[in-house]
Amino acid sequence: MKPYNVEIFTPDFQMAGHTNIHEISYKEDYLSSDENSITVFAMPGIEKQDFIRISRGKEEYAGVVTEIAYGTDKSKNMQTISYKPLMELFNMDMLFDVNAQGQGSMEQFIADAINALYVSNEDELQNIRGLSVKVLTNTENWSLHITPSEKGGHYNIVNLMDSVIIPALQKYNILLGASLDIQNKQVLVTIGRVAGNVLTIESDLPNILKKNVVIKQVSADVNKLIIYDTTDDYITKKVYYLHTDLGYDTKDEDRILPVVCDIRAVSSSEESGFDALAQTEASNTFSRAAFSNLIELTMLNGDELIKPDEMQFGQIVNVISDGTYYQSILTGREIGRNTKLIFGTVRLELTKILRRNS
């Protein structure tokens, strides 16, 4: 079988090393950056924060070097290179203006934050050479429920990845994609809602080699939300219900019981009507429940029925397991002798749970 091509580039896109490797295993989790590693004959001169690109045919995996170790049990001439996906570039704290929530599109807010940190930063050494950010869609009336760190203020210090980029996918299906364009010496970033139809996967068919389905119990969470409009003395209201399929709307049917009710109030204006504000509040309350599951499906590499190599993070799916439909979202993958697709926003590994809750 044709080997993988391994290339290492400096942050200025100069070639730092090149070799081949016959087999790799690769995992990537949008919710918590996984570290991968390869062991090759030593390439002197590579450093942390270099770019790595591993490719074979249509397969390509790109990342940032995080650790370099020399020598193995078998040979002192070997080198182990650890790396994380390009998303790790944006694992940095930022000053968040809470008043910016809902002002303009969320995609543009993320783009502006990345540009401020890595393109036009007054510390030129912090800027990422060739970084280009493109906004593909516009999502209005957004909120991350980030509050000021001090009473009466409007700022908080948050992590760009954990508090902004990841919740944007969980709540609004907004995906940040990052890739290397070595020829043009660019890091290309796109930000937008994932396009395409909802896919249906039957997990009990023979092409699924292994499945693991964990559904979070949401009966103790808020499942009824009453929202009042303060501008007309609380006369106008909307009531939203969470349904058994974890969808939500104003229809009083097929509800999760027992009732756990919450009440909110919003102030409408000419710029922001009550209906839009109420929908935002409902989304903030219920949207994560729709993907509060962990579904892992293992199949052959290049499975012709599901086509796992063509699926993007953020793809919404209906997984049929034992006759029941579960809606979920693609958030991770592991590639080795087989391919494992990981759906949902629940993680069982303690280190990942701690990161998501920190």
Image: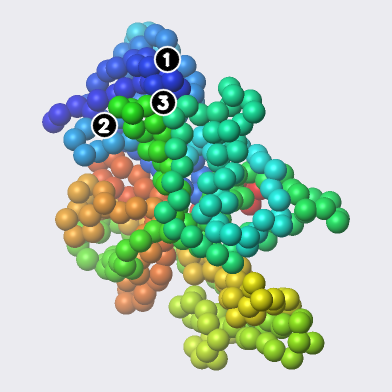
- Which quadrant of the structure image shows residue 209? bottom left
Label whose residue precedes the other's in the sequence (3 or 1): 1
- Inter-mark Cα distance, 2 to 1: 18 Å
Q: Residue placed farthest to the front in the image?
A: 270
Which dot marks residue 6?
none
Residue 88 sits above or below residue 153 on the image: above
Q: Which residue is mark 2?
A: 55
Residue drawn at x 38%, y 17% is 14
- Inter-mark Cα distance, 3 to 2: 13 Å
Label whose residue precedes the other's in the sequence (2 or 1): 1
Q: Which residue is mark 1?
A: 46
Q: Residue placed farthest to the left in the image?
A: 1
- Inter-mark Cα distance, 3 to 1: 10 Å
- What crowding class fits label 3: few (fewer than 14 Cα within 10 Å), some (14-19), or many (20 or more)? many
Q: Is residue 67 visible?
A: no
The residue lying toward the viewer, choosing from 60 and 182, is 182
Q: Residue placed farthest to the right in the image?
A: 151
**Horizontal relation, residue 128 to residue 259: left or right:** left
Residue 349 x, y percent position in the rendering = 52, 48
| Amino acid residing under circle 3 | Phe
- What crowding class fits label 2: few (fewer than 14 Cα within 10 Å), some (14-19), or many (20 or more)? some
User: Which SS class for mark 1?
Assistant: loop
Which dot marks residue 51?
3
Residue 121 sits above or below residue 197 on the image: above
Q: Is residue 202 visible?
A: yes
**Horizontal relation, residue 339 to residue 57: left or right:** right
Locate the N terminus and report the quarter of the image it occupies: top left
- Determine contact: label 3, label 2, CB under 8 Å: no
Residue drawn at x 22%, y 66% is 205
